[in-house]
Amino acid sequence: MAIIEAKNIKKIYNHETVPLEVLKGMTFDIEEGEFVAIMGPSGSGKSTLLHIIGFLDPQTSGTCLFNGKGMDDYTEDEIAHIRNKEMGFVFQAFNLLPRTNVYENVKLPLIYSDRPEKEWHELIMKAIKAVGLEHRLKHETSQLSGGEKQRVAIARALVNDARVIFADEPTGNLDSKSGALIMKTLQELNQKFGYTIILITHETYTAEHAKRIIKIIDGQIKSDHKVHKRHDANHGFKK
């Protein structure tokens, strides 16, 4: 079953009164449980595409559906609920709360959810255990390595039992060893727990950790193929 359906997606910005077409008609589906890498060079439109399929920004034309419905089919409150409950977002810059420990950072999405507070602790611990950070529970963000900060960000994305995790250049601020651990974490979340993972990256060796690669150049899909060879989580990262 397709959880995301994109049909002829176009995005045009008015840049100094001159139209700038960033996405030029993209069509693809993403099935529930897939691990898909959307790969392309800087300026190819991949982050713009993520914002559209993640319901953060509307397309100019075309159709983007999540669970069979587009942004126009939902109220603003429903869209906010979907982004909080159904989707999780992980960004290159981590976006963690300073002077706050791992547990409190992971708890944040629950504060804005309709989850009963009595369920929070179990959900928080489940997410933290999924990324292997139980031993850092009470450590503040300043005491964490870059890789640990990104794993906290992943746990925060998971805490509401999100169905889809959007990861935008999650290894971009990390050294090779930490990057490898993040990719291993994402692989395990997909393979062991069945999360749908959508990875945005400009790096081939990062994209190859996914099961499918959609390559985009200049706002258009150039290729869309399965990754047949399974890669170890350390593959491609320099020591």
Image (cartoon, rainbow, N blue to C red):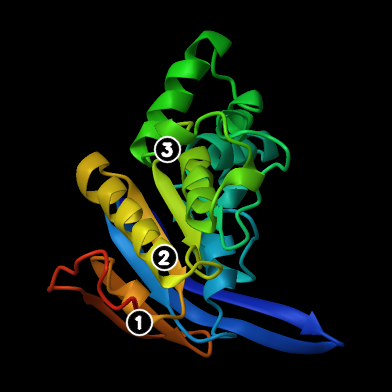
Looking at numbered disc 1 in the image, what kind of residue is underneath it?
Answer: Thr
Q: Residue at x 41, y 47 (%)?
A: 164
Looking at numbered disc 2 in the image, what kind of residue is underneath it?
Answer: Gly
Location of mark 2 (residue): 179
User: SS of the residue at dot 1?
Assistant: helix
Estimate the x, y position of residue 146 in percent, counting from the top left: 54, 57
Q: Residue at x 32, y 45 (%)?
A: 195
Q: Is residue 94 above or below residue 192?
A: below
The answer to which image quadrant residue 110 occupies is: top right
Visible in this render: residue 171? yes
Sequence-earlier tag: 2 or 1: 2
Location of mark 3 (residue): 133
Alpha carbons under labels 2 and 1: distance apart: 13 Å
Q: Nearer the viewer, residue 210 or 150?
A: 150
Residue 162, disc: none
Q: Is residue 231 above or below residue 220?
A: above
Looking at numbered disc 3 in the image, what kind of residue is underneath it?
Answer: Leu
Location of mark 1 (residue): 204
Q: Is residue 95 left or right of residue 194?
A: right
Q: Is residue 5 above or below residue 173?
A: above
User: SS of the residue at dot 3?
Assistant: loop
Q: Nearer the viewer, residue 229 or 176?
A: 176
Report crowding for label 3: few under 14, some 14 to 19, many 20 or more residues within 10 A (C-alpha). Answer: some
